[in-house]
């Protein structure tokens, strides 16, 4: 039987170390909502989402109360909208109508984000994909809860540089349209290489076409718990350190597995995956950067950071994999700047640069995330940064992503505030040498060779 | 059997266990295990109870015990047992 030490340990994680289940995300296929009439399509989308997700928020809260563990977010992901709107949308503003419908549904069922305003274009854009991409600045500025993601590249298909160039322009335009909120719109937009179909985390969640009709995915978190555990083994060998992280990740993920199974059972839809990520929040003690410091770095960005992060990411996966029957999504450590107090401090201290963050993305989950850059950063430079990150993902066969916020009117060192879980960030300098002749080349970068790996 | 874990944390005082047990008996909850420690003057108690005989809804029991905790001046939480079982047992 469970003993008092174990009970107190679990409750200490929840009460003092910010342990929570970050999200229950319901994935809903909208493929059966396709219609050539936009009005009819939006009606079908509304009916389907409202009926499927009607009890999502209440059930999530109920499970949280039963187990005494906070379930912070309840969210929805849908089939990439470029696929759904193809036959009904003849202009970008038609896609914006679908975005508005999604936003209304999100508000009605009470979820804080709905993801899937997406297109998958790693080997080129269809007319529908391009219309959706061009609609993003308007769609994300007139809606509140819609998140958008574009998959621009993959290991097997290469990088669609035409789409990379277009995304640079769209990010700038979106920042301009949400200038009064420091470019907040860009926090709801992410571009991917090798995007997973079952990621429950925003802004990149969408419901892949290979998935069943409706599915429950869960994302767990707990950087504070890992940090507290690592504190206990200060000065120990790497073996002890790695074992500690692995065991902690196991415990955290087990709760995710429990919540996922319970949510699936209560809602009556299949359990998809548990995403075992360390996702920080701006709250003190909920920081991935603090774990890196505890491992032995003065600040993230110091020499050794990439190795420490690689170790952390790998142990989290090793511990988590055994704890859940199905693991998926992004699974690993996230290193967003604005959502992690330790990262913010490191940038302020001058320890962390975009270039170092880029290196860190080679060994951890996802990529250049929630980074504020100067408002006058050109579209070409944004595209250049995206292309670099896509190349890292493509060559190394991993998911990488970019979520940059060129905050209008802001300069290096200024602070940009997004609020809530999105946090705040100091504007970071970007390399100002020009890459426009590279970005202006048309077409795509071919998929890499899969042999001669060196 | 439906198991719940009740934890009581707070300043030690006379009658904490008695009052919690009285409530549980009234609501036909069977106590399977009790353990307690006092660290730094703070009282930590854990009970494992079987609430399958209770007519109350689980959330009502949580609310009632939470209220009782308020009266005594301690914090009482009720959680379903599976979260601990999952985390600490393979």
Image (tube, coloured by chain):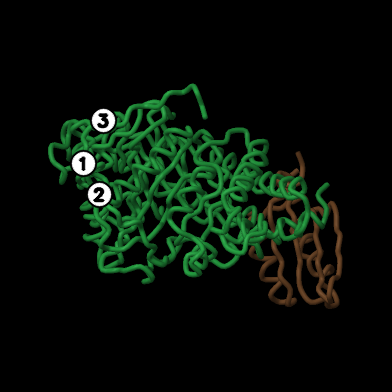
Chain colours: A green, B brown
Of the numbered discs 2 and 3, the one sitting upstream in the chain is 3
* Residue B53 is at least partly visible in this image: no
Of the numbered discs 1 and 2, the one sitting upstream in the chain is 2
Q: Is residue A384 above or below residue A410?
A: above
Q: CA distance from mark 2 to mark 3?
A: 19 Å
Residue A76's spot in the image, x, y percent? 41, 45
Give the left or right position of residue B35, taking residue A121 as reference: right
* Residue A421 is at least partly visible in this image: yes
> Marks 1 and 2: CB-CB under 8 Å?
yes
Q: Quadrant of residue A224?
A: bottom right
Identify which residue, A291 or A439, lies in the foreground.
Answer: A439
- The residue that label 2 is drawn on is A380
Identify the element where label 1 is drawn: loop
Chain under callout 1: A
Within-10-Å neighbours for mark 2: few <14, some 14–19, many 20+: many
Disc ID at residue A440: 1
Give the left or right position of residue A12, taking residue A21 as reference: right
Residue B55's spot in the image, x, y percent? 68, 53
Identify which residue, B75 or A5, lies in the foreground.
Answer: A5
Identify the element where label 2 is drawn: helix
Disc ID at residue A124: 3
Query: Do the residues indicated by labels 1 and 3 lie within the same chain of the protein?
Result: yes
> Marks 1 and 3: CB-CB under 8 Å?
no
């Amino acid at each position: 039987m469970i003993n008092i030490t174990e009970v107190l340990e679990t409750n200490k994680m929840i009460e003092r170390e910010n342990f929570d289940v970050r999200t229950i995300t319901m994935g809903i296929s909208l493929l059966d909502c396709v219609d050539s009439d936009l009005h009819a399509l939006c009606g079908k989308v509304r009916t389907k989402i409202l009926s499927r997700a009607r009890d999502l928020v209440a059930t999530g809260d109920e499970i949280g109360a039963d187990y005494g563990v906070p379930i912070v977010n309840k969210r929805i992901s849908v089939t990439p909208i470029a696929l759904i709107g193809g036959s009904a949308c003849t202009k970008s503003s038609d896609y914006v109508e679908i975005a508005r419908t999604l936003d209304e549904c999100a508000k009605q069922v009470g979820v804080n984000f709905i993801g899937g305003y997406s297109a998958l274009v790693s080997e080129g854009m269809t007319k529908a994909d391009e219309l959706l991409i061009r609609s993003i600045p308007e769609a994300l500025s007139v809606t509140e809860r819609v998140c958008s993601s574009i998959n621009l590249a993959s290991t097997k298909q290469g990088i669609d540089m035409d789409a990379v160039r277009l995304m640079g322009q769209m990010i700038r335009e979106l920042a301009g349209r949400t200038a009064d909120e420091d470019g907040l719109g860009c926090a709801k937009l992410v571009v991917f290489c090798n995007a997973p179909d079952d990621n429950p985390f925003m802004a990149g969640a969408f419901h892949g076409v290979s998935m069943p009709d409706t599915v429950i995915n869960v994302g767990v978190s707990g950087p504070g718990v890992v940090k507290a555990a690592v504190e206990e083994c200060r000065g120990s060998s790497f073996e002890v350190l790695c074992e500690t992280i692995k065991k902690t990740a196991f415990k955290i993920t087990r709760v995710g597995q429990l919540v996922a199974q319970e949510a699936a059972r209560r809602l009556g839809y299949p359990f998809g995956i548990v995403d075992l990520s360390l996702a920080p929040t701006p709250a003190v003690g909920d920081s991935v950067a603090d774990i890196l410091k505890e491992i032995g770095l003065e600040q993230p960005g110091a020499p050794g950071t990439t190795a420490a992060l690689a170790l952390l990411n790998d142990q989290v996966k090793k511990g988590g994999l055994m704890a859940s029957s199905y693991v998926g999504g992004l699974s690993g450590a996230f290193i967003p700047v604005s959502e992690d107090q330790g990262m913010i401090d490191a940038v302020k201290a001058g320890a962390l640069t975009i270039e170092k963050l880029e290196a860190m993305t080679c060994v951890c989950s996802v990529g250049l995330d929630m980074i504020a850059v100067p408002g006058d950063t050109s579209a070409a430079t944004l595209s250049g940064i995206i292309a670099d990150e896509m190349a890292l993902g493509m060559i190394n066969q991993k998911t990488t992503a970019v979520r940059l916020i060129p905050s209008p009117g802001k300069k290096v060192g200024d602070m940009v505030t997004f609020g809530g879980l999105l946090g705040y960030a100091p504007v970071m300098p970007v390399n100002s040498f020009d890459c426009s002749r590279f970005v202006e080349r048309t077409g795509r970068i071919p998929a890499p060779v899969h042999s001669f790996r060196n | 059997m439906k198991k719940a874990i009740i934890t009581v944390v707070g300043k030690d005082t006379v009658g904490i266990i008695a009052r919690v047990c009285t409530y549980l008996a009234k609501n036909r909850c069977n106590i399977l295990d009790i353990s307690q420690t006092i660290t730094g003057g703070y009282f930590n108690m854990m009970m494992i109870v079987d609430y399958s005989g209770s007519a109350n809804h689980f959330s009502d029991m949580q609310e009632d015990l939470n209220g009782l905790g308020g009266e005594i001046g301690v914090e009482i939480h009720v959680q379903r047992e599976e979260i601990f079982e999952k985390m600490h047992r393979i």
